[in-house]
Image (cartoon, helix red, strand yellow):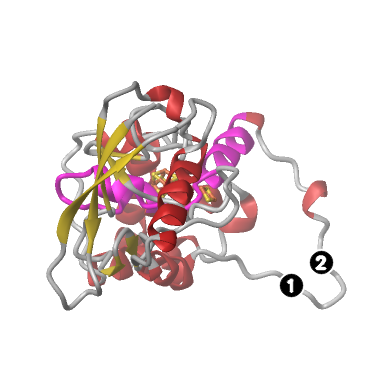
Amino acid sequence: MKLTLKIWRQENANTKGKMVTYPIDGVEGDMSFLEMLDVLNEELINKGEEPVEFDHDCREGICGACSLQINGEPHGPDKLVTTCQLHMRSFKDGDTIVIEPFRAKAFPVVKDLIVDRSSFDRIQHAGGYISVNTSGNTIDANSIPINKHDADDAFAAATCIGCGACVAACKNASAMLFTSAKVSQYALLPQGQVEAADRVQEMVRQMDEEGFGNCSNTGACEIECPKGISLENIARMNREYMSANTKG
Ligand code: SF4
Ligand code: FES
């Protein structure tokens, strides 16, 4: 396949970026999107030009490091896949592909297609944990019965990989889907009850402090989420938040 890539290039957060056009040839359908960018970068390096910087780690859809807004969609046109799992067979010969970083005030550009998503880490640090009694008398987690539906919903929420596609898809750059998944994975389990009220208050406070927008129920986040995290988590987080505030 011959393609035309229009890629966002930006030196750092303090400089202006611009789209640069790169033609690319010999792209195979079974290449992943990131492998296609590897080929482009090899060509650029061979020509003595600066390679395009992009984020990745596992390349297996697990770590959440890869991002990329591809033709206006976070993680590209396929559903329930990350950019590293997107294959070039989803495009056709002669296509033009526009590649940009995830855009949000709380995700400043580091370079080219890499954004700083440490705001997500700070939301997690604000309350995404449980306290465990390590005195030697700890109850084995498996000995606490948990309703099957709650266990399934907690597990589904815990599959969030923190990629940030929900923020990039949202017109308000809201992080409600991410934060609610992290709140839900504990709120549904007995182990999460001790800090439940503080957790939701602190995580929502940090989310607002980082500059993410509010949720206006558009649902774009759920559609673009590579892990299928449900909007039900946002409703659960809102209930948890109201209940925590009522208790004071
Ligand atoms: S909720 Fe989905 S889109 Fe948002 S960070 Fe988690 S996995 Fe990524
Ligand atoms: S590189 Fe790890 S999810 Fe894509």
Task: Give the SS element for disc 1.
Answer: loop
User: Is residue 125 visible to us here?
Assistant: yes
Task: Respond yes or no on whether mark 1 lies under 8 Å from ligand 1.
Answer: no
Magenta range is 149-178
Marks 2 and 1, the one that precedes in the sequence = 1
Q: Nearer the viewer, residue 197 or 33?
A: 33
Q: For the residue marked with disc 1, what is the amino acid? A: Asn
Q: Nearer the viewer, residue 149 or 145?
A: 149
Whether the magenta-drawn stretch holds residue 163 is answered as yes
Q: Residue at x 46, y 40 (%)?
A: 82
Query: Looking at the image, can residue 181 be seen?
Result: no
Q: Is residue 205 one of those drawn in magenta?
A: no
> Residue 155 in the image: x percent, y percent?
60, 40
Q: Give above or below for 138 relative to 158.
A: below
Residue 187 in picture, x, y percent from top left? 51, 50
The residue at the point 19 percent across, 53 percent down is 20
Q: Secondary structure at mark 2?
A: loop
Q: With 58 as the anchor, is 242 left or right in this view?
A: left
Q: Residues within 10 Å of mark 1 (few under 14, many from 20)?
A: few
Q: Please tell me which residue lies in front, 51 or 230.
A: 51
- Residue 133: mark: 1
* Residue 210 placement: quadrant: bottom left
Magenta stretch, main secondary structure, is helix
Q: In the rendered view, does 178 fall on the left or right side of 219?
A: right
Mark 2 near mark 1, Cβ–Cβ under 8 Å?
A: yes
Q: What is the distance, in whole Å, between disc 2 and disc 1 at their CAs?
A: 6 Å
| Dot label at residue 138 | 2
